[in-house]
Image (cartoon, rainbow, N blue to C red):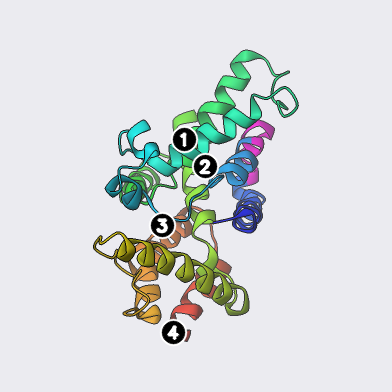
């Protein structure tokens, strides 16, 4: 989790935002929200997950009561920076517009908490199966923006193999470093984080089958993204 990841997520969500069906729905304000959320969504990431922070009774876990610890920290850090007079590029906006942007960015970044994944995906699938009008309904539009944010955040396995595989190695190294830290603290090693007992193909295929494919298949029912699904399925076969 670093600036390169932020740039990668920004690139992906910008691509999704320019697809015809999406670009016809979102306006300039939503586009600004998308860019801000992508840039700040992992700012000041410590390289460990929420469970580790909660288990070790980290100050951030205490501050946020074990609820979306990292996501709340990223948001608080980002808006604290943006409140500085030399960084307050939103300061000239009308109060109501700033409030709307802040609320939307908060919703989008909180949606990147994987513990919220299945509930959000179920809500999105139910919406598109019934009445879903993000152009006219703000609630629906926010759900769509949250789904786009989720897609961008976990998009590495949807890229062509030469781009995807180095990201896989980076993510795996971060996981294993957390596992090393857990061992040093005599804590149980988290799943997929033990460098002495890791099956990368199995873990990647599992992530694709249980998280990515259901997510992008649902998105494909609303926005046609065969190029994304095709790359994801090709990478699964590669493993």
Upstream in sequence: badge 1 or badge 2: 1
Q: Nearer the viewer, mark 1 or mark 2?
A: 1
Q: Nearer the viewer, mark 3 or mark 1?
A: 1
Q: Which residue is located at x 29 percent, y 67 percent?
A: 191
Q: Residue furthest top?
A: 95
| Residue 218 tag number | 3
> Does the magenta portion include 31?
yes
Instruction: Check contact, mark 1 vs mark 2: CB within 8 A.
Output: yes
| Residue 239 tag number | 4
**Callout 3 environment at 10 Å: few (<14), some (14 to 19), or many (20+)?**
some
Q: Nearer the viewer, mark 2 or mark 3?
A: 2
Q: Main secondary structure of the magenta part?
A: helix
SS type, badge 2: helix
SS type, badge 1: helix
Q: Nearer the viewer, mark 3 or mark 4?
A: 4
User: Picture quarter containing residue 179?
Assistant: bottom left
In the figure, 203 relative to 105: above or below? Answer: below
SS type, badge 3: helix
Q: How far across and how far down the image is residue 55, in percent?
A: 27, 49
Q: Which residue is located at x 56 percent, y 73 percent?
A: 164
Region in magenta: 23-32
Q: Mark 2 — residue?
A: 145
Q: Which residue is located at x 44 percent, y 47 percent?
A: 112
| Residue 107 tag number | 1
Q: How far across and how far down the image is residue 113, in percent?
A: 40, 47
Q: Nearer the viewer, mark 4 or mark 2?
A: 4
Q: How far across and how far down the image is residue 209, in percent?
A: 35, 70
What separation in Å lies between label 3 and label 1 (alpha carbons)?
Answer: 20 Å
| Residue 174 tag number | none
Instruction: Check contact, mark 3 vs mark 4: CB within 8 A.
Output: no
111 on left or right of 192: right
């Amino acid at each position: 989790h670093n600036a390169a990841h932020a740039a990668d997520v920004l690139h992906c969500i910008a691509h999704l935002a320019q697809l015809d069906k999406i670009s016809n729905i979102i306006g300039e304000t939503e586009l600004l929200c998308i860019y801000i959320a992508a840039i700040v969504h992992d700012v000041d990431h410590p390289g460990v997950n929420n469970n580790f922070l909660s288990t070790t009774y980290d100050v951030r876990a205490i501050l946020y009561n074990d609820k979306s610890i990292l996501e709340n920290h990223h948001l608080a850090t980002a808006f604290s920076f943006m409140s500085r007079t030399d960084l307050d590029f939103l300061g000239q906006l009308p109060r109501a517009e700033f409030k709307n942007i802040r609320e939307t960015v908060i919703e989008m970044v909180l949606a990147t908490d994987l513990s919220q994944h299945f509930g959000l995906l179920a809500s999105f699938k139910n919406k598109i199966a019934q009445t879903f009008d993000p152009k006219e309904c703000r609630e629906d539009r926010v759900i769509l923006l949250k789904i786009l944010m989720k897609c961008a955040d976990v998009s590495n396995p949807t890229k062509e193999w030469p781009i995807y595989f180095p990201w896989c190695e980076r993510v795996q190294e971060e996981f294993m470093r957390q596992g090393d830290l857990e061992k040093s603290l005599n804590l149980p090693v988290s799943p997929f984080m033990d460098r002495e007992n890791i099956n990368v193909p199995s873990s990647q295929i599992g992530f694709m089958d249980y998280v990515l494919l259901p997510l992008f298949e649902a998105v494909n029912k609303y926005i046609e993204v065969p190029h994304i699904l095709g790359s994801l399925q090709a990478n699964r076969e590669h493993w």
